[in-house]
Amino acid sequence: MRIFCMNLVSLLALALATLLLVSVASAAGKAQTFTGRVSDSMCGAKHMMEGDAAACLRACVEKGSKYALVVGDKVYTLDTKDKTLLGKLDALADKNAKVTGTADGETIAVSSVAPAQ
C-alpha cells in the first residue's frame, strides 16, 4: 500500500507540473497591448546624444539599433520588419504609443502600432 501511495503522489505531482507548463506556454503566446514611449534599444530610457531625443533615436536606428518601447522602468525591444509598422514607429519617435504584439521576455513581436491618447 505504501508503494502505491508514493507512486500515486509522484503521478499527481507530474500531472500538476505538466498542467502548469501547458498553461504558462499558452499564456506566453497571446498578444498584449503595451503603452509607453517609443525609443531605441541602444539608448533605452535615456538618450545619449545631447539635444533632440527623437533625432538621437533615429540616428541609433539608422546605425542598426532596433526600436524599443519604454514602459515604466522596463525597456522592450520591438521586433518587426514590416515597413508600415517601422514607419509608424519612426513617426512616433520619442512619443507615447500603444504597441500590440506577443512578448517574449524583453522583446515584443509587433503586430500593430498606434499613438497613445
Image: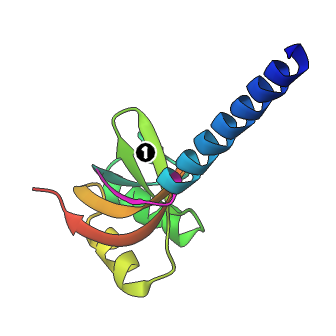
- In this view, the residue in front, 58 or 8, is 8
Q: Is residue 64 above or below residue 39?
A: below
Examine the structure image and report whether residue 55 is included in the region drawn in magenta.
Answer: no
Q: Quadrant of the C terminus?
A: bottom left
Which residue: 60% across, 43% down? 19
| 2 relative to 63 in the view: left or right | right
- Read off the residue under disc 1: 47
Q: Is residue 46 above or below residue 41?
A: above
Q: Quadrant of the N terminus?
A: top right
| 32 relative to 16 in the view: left or right | left
Residue 52 in percent (x, y) is at: 31, 53
Which residue: 50% across, 60% down? 29
Residue 20 in percent (x, y) is at: 59, 40
Examine the structure image and report whether residue 33 is included in the region drawn in magenta.
Answer: yes
**Which segment is the magenta one?**
28-34
Q: Residues within 10 Å of mark 1 (few under 14, many from 20)?
A: some
The reply to whether residue 52 is visible in this rendering is no
Residue sitting at the far right = 3
In terms of image quadrants, where is residue 88?
A: bottom left
Which residue: 64% across, 35% down? 16
Q: Is residue 68 above or below residue 43?
A: below
Residue sitting at the far left = 117
Residue sitting at the far bottom = 83
